[in-house]
Image (cartoon, helix red, strand yellow):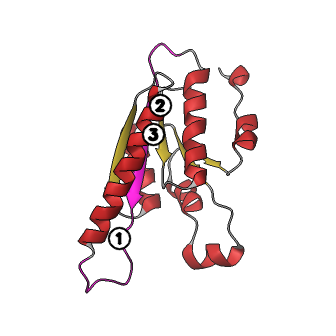
């Protein structure tokens, strides 16, 4: 395993699960150097409000994400790990895929929300869009981390 990974974080339960899996993966390997965990939150511009100034909404969402990312930093510190956090503005799937490529991360972890087919058709699926855009492996993590933990087995590490 390389020492780099990117976690797409939107403060959902599933993204917390993805972050926890990243911590588990980072602490389960005996690496010569601490792994680089990058956590990226993306604020999406409100659609259809082109005539309205949305900068205050974006600023507020950015502040909220920064608070939550600070809590993730503390969580990582409990495992003697440090993480890089960032908040960006744009299309979540494009921004996450681009960041992974720029940072040289061989894989991305994102939460996957269980939604109805109609809901996915109307608003799309960020995890699916990330998987289709990324040039690396994308690990989607459901709400139940135990199922994700069974997929990842440190004993199989090479």
Quarter holding the C terminus is top right
| Residue assigned mark 1 | 45
Quarter holding the N terminus is top right
Q: CA distance from mark 1 to mark 3?
A: 24 Å
| Residue assigned mark 2 | 76
Residue 51 among magenta residues: yes
Left or right: 116 in relation to 24: right
Q: How many marks?
A: 3
Q: Residue at x 27, y 75 (%)?
A: 54
Where disc 3 sits, the SS reads helix
Where disc 1 sits, the SS reads loop
Q: CB of mark 3 within 8 Å of CB of mark 2?
A: yes
The numbered mark at residue 72 is 3
Which of 14/37 is in front? 14
Q: CA distance from mark 1 to mark 2?
A: 29 Å
Numbered range of the magenta stretch: 31-53
Q: Is residue 4 above or below residue 92?
A: above
Where disc 2 sits, the SS reads helix
Q: CA distance from mark 3 to mark 2?
A: 6 Å
- Image quadrant of residue 30? top right
Is residue 157 visible in this depiction of the protein? yes
Q: Main secondary structure of the magenta part?
A: loop
Q: Residue at x 50, y 51 (%)?
A: 134
């Amino acid at each position: 395993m390389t020492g780099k990974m990117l976690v797409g974080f939107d403060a959902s339960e599933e993204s917390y699960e993805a972050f926890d899996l990243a911590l588990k993966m980072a602490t389960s390997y005996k690496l010569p150097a601490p792994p680089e965990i990058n956590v990226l939150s993306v604020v999406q511009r409100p659609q259809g409000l082109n005539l309205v100034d949305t900068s205050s909404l974006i600023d507020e969402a950015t502040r909220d994400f920064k608070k939550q990312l600070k809590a993730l930093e503390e969580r990582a510190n409990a495992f003697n790990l440090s993480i890089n956090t960032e908040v960006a503005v744009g299309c979540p799937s494009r921004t996450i895929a681009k960041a992974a490529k720029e940072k040289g991360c061989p894989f991305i972890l994102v939460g996957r929300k269980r939604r109805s087919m109609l809901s996915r058709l109307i608003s799309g699926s960020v995890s699916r869009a990330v998987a289709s855009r990324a040039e690396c492996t994308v690990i989607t993590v459901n709400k139940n981390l135990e199922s994700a933990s069974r997929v990842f087995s440190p004993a199989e590490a090479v």
